[in-house]
Image (tube, rainbow, N blue to C red):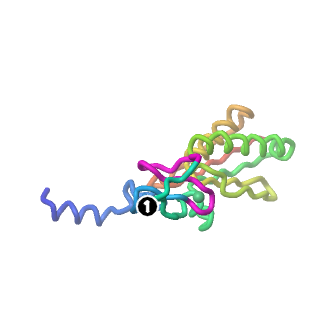
């Protein structure tokens, strides 16, 4: 394949491996004005202080929160949920705390109470998966994972009667 064909191919499939929320800032060092996470050496991470050359760039997690564009959606339902709502909320928040400490872009986006259950959305696939596994490990129930075709979004349904 020559160069021209290659660039055409890239244009035809721009979404492949190209999560728009994970574009690195042009300059090598950045600081998110919303949450204080720092971009350096190719990744966003919590650090004590920003290098002086840091540019102000909203991080992918804060951008997703601002746009209300989750990477993961968990739908919880069933009678068990009504009886253990506080416990389950604690489990979700604790999972976020430990995940976010290690992976700065993995955060809860929103938790909404619904008539027939609860919905939790996340800024990262990994956190959604961790919460799904934590629910299954703690409470059993039935759980289904379904990924979007480009694998940039996961829908997780958890149910226990
Ligand atoms: Zn941020």
Q: From the viewer's perspective, is residue 149 above or below residue 68? A: above
Disc 1 C-beta below 8 A from ligand 1: no
Residue 47 falls within the magenta-colored stretch: yes
Q: What residue do we see at 77% from left, 53% from top?
A: 117
For the image, the number of numbered tags is 1
The picture places residue 46, in percent across and down from the top left corner, at 57, 47
The magenta stretch spans which residues? 32-48
- Quadrant of the rendered image holding ligand 1: bottom right
Label 1: which secondary element: loop
In the rendered structure, the answer to whether residue 149 lies left or right of residue 10 reads right
Q: From the viewer's perspective, is residue 109 above or below residue 45? A: below
> Which residue is nearer to you in this view: 17 or 132?
17
Q: From the viewer's perspective, is residue 139 above or below residue 85? A: above
Q: Which secondary structure is most common in the magenta stretch?
A: loop
Q: What residue do we see at 14% from left, 56% from top?
A: 1
Which residue sits furthest left?
A: 2
Quarter containing the C terminus: top right
């Amino acid at each position: 394949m020559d160069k021209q064909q290659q660039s055409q191919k890239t244009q035809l499939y721009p979404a492949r491996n190209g999560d728009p929320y994970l574009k690195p800032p042009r300059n090598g060092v950045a600081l998110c004005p919303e949450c204080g996470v720092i971009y350096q050496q190719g990744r966003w991470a919590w650090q004590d202080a920003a290098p002086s050359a840091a540019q102000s760039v909203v991080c992918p997690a804060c951008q997703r929160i601002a746009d209300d564009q989750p990477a993961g959606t968990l739908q919880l339902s069933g009678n068990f949920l009504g009886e253990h709502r506080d416990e389950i909320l604690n489990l979700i928040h604790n999972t976020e705390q430990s995940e976010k400490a290690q992976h700065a872009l993995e955060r809860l986006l929103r938790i909404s109470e619904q008539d027939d259950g609860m919905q939790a959305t996340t800024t990262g696939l990994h956190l959604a998966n961790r919460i799904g596994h934590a629910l299954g490990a703690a409470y059993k129930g039935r759980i289904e994972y379904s990924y979007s075709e480009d694998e940039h979004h996961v829908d997780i349904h958890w149910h226990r009667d």
